[in-house]
Amino acid sequence: MKPTVISYSRVSSNKQLNGTGLAQQKDKTILEKVSAQHGLPIDERSFSDEGKSGFHSHNLKGELGKVLQLIDEGSIVKDSILVISSLDRLTRAQTNEALELLLSIVNRGVRVYTAMDDKLYSSDSPNLTADLIFSVIVLATAHEESLKKSHRTIGAAKKVVDDHLDGKRGKSGYGYKFAVGTLPFWITTDSDNSLKLDPIYAPIAVEIVDRLIAGEGCTSITDWLNATYVPPKSHKKRWNMQCIIDLHRKPTLMGKFSTTIGSISYDLDGYLPPLISEDKYFKLYSVRKQRDIKRKPNGVLPIVTGIGVAKCSCCGGSVVSTTTAGRTRFRCNNSLSRKANCAGVSVESKVVEDIILGSGRVYDLKPRTNETNDKLDALKMKRNSLTARLDQMTSDYMANPSNVLATMLQATESELNQIDKEIEQNQIDNAVVHSIIPKIPTDRDSQRKWVKQVFKAIEFHKVARGQVLIRFIANNGFTEGAFIKNGKLIKKGHLTGSFKGDLELLQFGSLQDYVAGGALNQWLNE
């Protein structure tokens, strides 16, 4: 897989969404410029966190989190360039956390380009020290700005609450909108910023409730909405099915509203206009809960899904369990809910669980001899000494910048990078793999806990219809693959033929590349 130029953007406010901020961040001209300068193609994938706070790191649970995951998995490869408008689009967190985030990308070999100041942050840059010092200043400034804004926002929100508790109401007869935060899609504001039912979307919301109470499924309702109505701005280009799924959990339907400011929680009666009556809300809640109960498997608890380890290698989404006619399958949740353009992996759960429970091997890495331990300890001691020296030199440089110190900093950083490479190679070359047979639990609940304890990830990749490649990644870094065809295990073992090769594939490659490059066919024919 070749390196590419990848776009990431973040906008945290409606003003940015509706104005020029998003358009500027997605400016194709910038991507084309970077592509031409570095001779790299523009990646078809682009990532954007809309309405996600960088100050509270909400984007780490959104598209930015997906970017970091793809870097870790090797789907975004070394020497790729992540293009952002400025460093504060990555994060506005506290400076030490913000710098750690930037370094977590750069240290994995992925470069970061900021369009605002035309800077490229790269681990092999001769000016890395000066660049990082500059980045600290930018990130610290961004955090201070957000901190001041946060204090102003909390003060403004507290005033809205106090005014409401004192009986102040707007033209609509209800409360006033907070300066930040999103409203339910069926609520809008009057001319004085007080809250009222949206004349377009409130009737649609009522119809959604009626359909849910009548027993219609969320997928069917979402399809009907997308075919019939333009979605609200908060749903981007299509109606969001997750909003329909969660609707019965929203007391805002009957006008109830709760908020937390600082560490104090408030229940605000009469703040929102009710969409439906309390009786209707509890009827909806009862219907949806009964539907959830019916969906649960009949006494069979999957041991792989629902614990955060099963992932689709195509889109990065979770793999979930579905049961039809008594047969349980593992399927990509994004494909099921149509959240992403995914090939839609699907495999019988039993064959996967048999692989895990049948072998029951837990792999451990241990050094061969005390001699290799001594060498590793010496390298680590040298690294600690270099790190302390680098910290002191950086402090001296910031207090009294000079060309001599800058040169010394660069030389020390280069030496430290070399030591890190030697430590990593030492750990790989001097590791032996041995298997032990642990006592595998017999009850399903304990088996789920055991799987979560043993595996860091289990990746599912659809090769073709009825053909699935699975990679088991243990928490100690050991990996193993399994190929399943038409519900039968065809082959299991090291995908590259060796432990070290599998580690390299895990670090630098993806299952998509492995299959597309012909390595799977070669492995199956060995």
Image: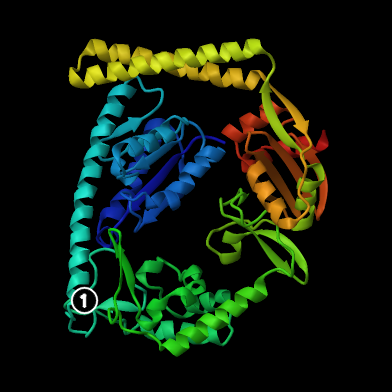
Q: Quadrant of the image for the N terminus?
A: top right
| Front residue of this view, candidates 203 and 521 | 203
Where's residue 60, x and y in %? 42, 48
* Identity of the residue drawn at 66% across and 76% down: 294
| Front residue of this view, candidates 87 and 178 | 178
Does 351 sit left or right of 115 as displayed?
A: right
Does 459 sit left or right of 24 as displayed?
A: right
* Identity of the residue drawn at 42% across and 83% down: 204
Which residue corresponds to mark 1? 165
Where's residue 212, x and y in %? 53, 82
* Identity of the residue drawn at 72% across and 50% down: 468
With respect to residue 125, does 319 lie above or below?
A: below
Inspect this view and state whether residue 106 appears. Answer: yes
> Residue 19 appears in which quarter of the rendering?
bottom left
Where's residue 492, x and y in %? 79, 40
Helix, strand or loop at label 1? It is helix
Does 350 sit left or right of 272 as displayed?
A: right
Tally the marks: 1
With respect to residue 204, does 13 lie above or below?
A: above
Inspect this view and state whether residue 182 appears. Answer: no
* Identity of the residue drawn at 52% across and 35% down: 77
Which amino acid, by three-letter code, is at mark 1? Leu
Colour theme? rainbow
Does 376 sit left or right of 116 as displayed?
A: right
With respect to residue 298, does 50 lie above or below?
A: above
Where's residue 329, x and y in %? 72, 61
Badge 1 local density, few (<14 within 10 Å), some, or many (20+)?
some
Q: Quadrant of the image for the C terminus?
A: top right
> Residue 407 appears in which quarter of the rendering?
top left
| Front residue of this view, candidates 285 and 126 | 285
